[in-house]
């Protein structure tokens, strides 16, 4: 059989993960791990772009997130799971790449621009923040990955990565494949209030939430404002709860749609049903998580072993890079 192609993706350490992380990334990673050589890492240095003042939680959040990866079915026998800051070679490659990119090129990145706007950083954005897509290019290219499974917002970074790969190859010799973004097939799941899902907004369901917590959260979800009581006809196409039914309860969707429109189905019953389906959907995950929480040594072993495999690959690439660039080691003259 031909060698499997390689994919790589990372997440910032956000602690316990939510449903959006599951449907937007993890489920896709799990599916891809049979078809590709998979590398998945915790992008902890990337956290510093915005949260450099609060570093105490980075490690506990890293561990909690990896527990959720494993609970969701990322299999350490198939995928390499590692921590970015433990593989120092990323930093060396980032430095070399940073010379190949102009500042205006970085300032044009729409995802970075939006972040700067949202965080009101207009005239005090750090050098590291503006440059994190270059670090991301190093994260990807150091493993010579062919594909990067990501959401739409990451596409500008992959575009930059492709430019850097081509530029390097052309300047110093072929080292890097030019990777492609593998877009996540599901559109982004909205938060329970209908806006963008985000842990800081409190509109998420965590993968670790117990059934009563799920029910409490779903009860507060935003539905069609025109449907006030049972009997009122609803508009499922604008209802967040209906969006969730489509993903987590597809079998009952036609019936729910019909009964919501006619008014026979009230929001209270509809939400109760959804809460139950979500609890069922997450039950195996929650169970696996509980088991993993009691096996800290195992988690440690998974990370150490993943780091070892990642480091080996990263070192091999850096040897090649130093060779091509004629810098970074001793040469006989
Ligand atoms: N920037 C990504 C995010 O914010 C995380 C990330 C860092 C990443 N390096 C990566 C994703 C490399 C894919 C590949 O979610």
Image (tube, rainbow, N blue to C red):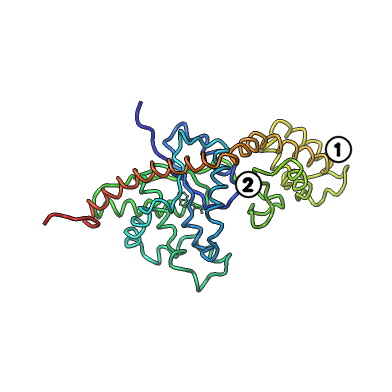
**Residue 70, image x, y percentages:** 55, 39
Can you name the residue that lies furthest to the bottom here?
Answer: 123
Whether residue 29 is situated above or below residue 132 in the rendered picture: above
In the rendered picture of this protein, how many numbered marks are placed on residues?
2
Identify which residue, 242 or 139, lies in the foreground. Answer: 139
Residue 200 occupies quadrant: bottom right
**Front-lying residue, 80 or 172:** 80
Left or right: 179 as drawn, with respect to 220: left
| Quarter of the rendering containing residue 199 | bottom right
Position of the N terminus, as image quadrant, is top left
Q: Position of residue 47 (x, y in %)?
A: 51, 58
Q: Which residue bears the numbered disc 1?
A: 264
Per the image, label 2 sits on a secondary structure element best described as loop
Measured as percent of width and height from the top left, residue 72 is found at: 58, 38
Cα distance in 3D space between marks 1 and 2 = 32 Å
Marker disc for residue 219: none
Q: Which quadrant of the rendered structure holds the C terminus?
A: bottom left
Q: Residue at x 55, y 59 (%)?
A: 56
Relative image position of residue 91 (x, y in whole percent): 37, 57
Using residue 221 as the reference point, say whether residue 231 is left or right of it: right
- Left or right of 299 in this view: 102: left
Query: Dot 2 corresponds to which residue?
Result: 18
Residue at x 29% of width, y 54% of height: 168
């Amino acid at each position: 059989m031909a060698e499997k192609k390689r994919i790589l993706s990372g997440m910032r350490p956000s602690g316990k993960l939510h449903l959006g992380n599951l449907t937007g990334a993890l489920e896709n990673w799990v599916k891809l791990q049979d078809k590709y050589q998979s590398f998945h890492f915790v992008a902890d240095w990337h956290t510093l772009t915005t949260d450099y003042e609060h570093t105490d939680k980075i490690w506990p959040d890293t561990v909690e997130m990896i527990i959720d990866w494993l609970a969701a079915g990322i299999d350490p026998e198939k995928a390499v799971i590692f921590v970015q800051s433990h593989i120092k070679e990323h930093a060396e490659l980032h430095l070399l790449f940073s010379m190949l990119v102009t500042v205006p090129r970085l300032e044009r990145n729409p995802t970075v621009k939006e972040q700067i706007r949202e965080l009101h950083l207009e005239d005090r954005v750090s050098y590291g923040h503006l440059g994190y897509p270059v670090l991301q290019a190093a994260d990807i290219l150091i493993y010579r990955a062919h594909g990067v499974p990501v959401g739409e917002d990451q596409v500008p970074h992959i575009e930059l990565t492709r430019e850097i790969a081509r530029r390097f190859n052309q300047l110093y010799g072929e080292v890097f494949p030019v990777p492609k973004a593998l877009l996540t097939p599901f559109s982004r799941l909205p938060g329970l209030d209908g806006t963008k899902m985000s842990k800081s907004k409190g509109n998420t369901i965590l993968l670790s939430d117990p059934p009563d917590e799920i029910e409490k959260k779903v009860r507060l979800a935003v539905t069609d404002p025109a449907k006030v009581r049972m009997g009122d006809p609803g508009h499922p196409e604008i209802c967040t709860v209906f969006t969730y039914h489509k993903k987590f309860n597809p079998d009952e969707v036609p019936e729910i749609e019909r009964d919501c429109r006619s008014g026979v189905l009230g929001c209270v019953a509809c939400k109760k049903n959804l809460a139950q389906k979500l609890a069922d959907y997450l039950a195996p995950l929650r169970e696996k998580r509980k088991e993993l929480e009691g096996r800290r040594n195992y988690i440690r072993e998974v990370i150490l072993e993943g780091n070892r495999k990642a480091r080996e690959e990263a070192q091999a690439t850096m040897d090649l890079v130093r060779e091509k660039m004629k810098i970074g080691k001793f040469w006989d003259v």
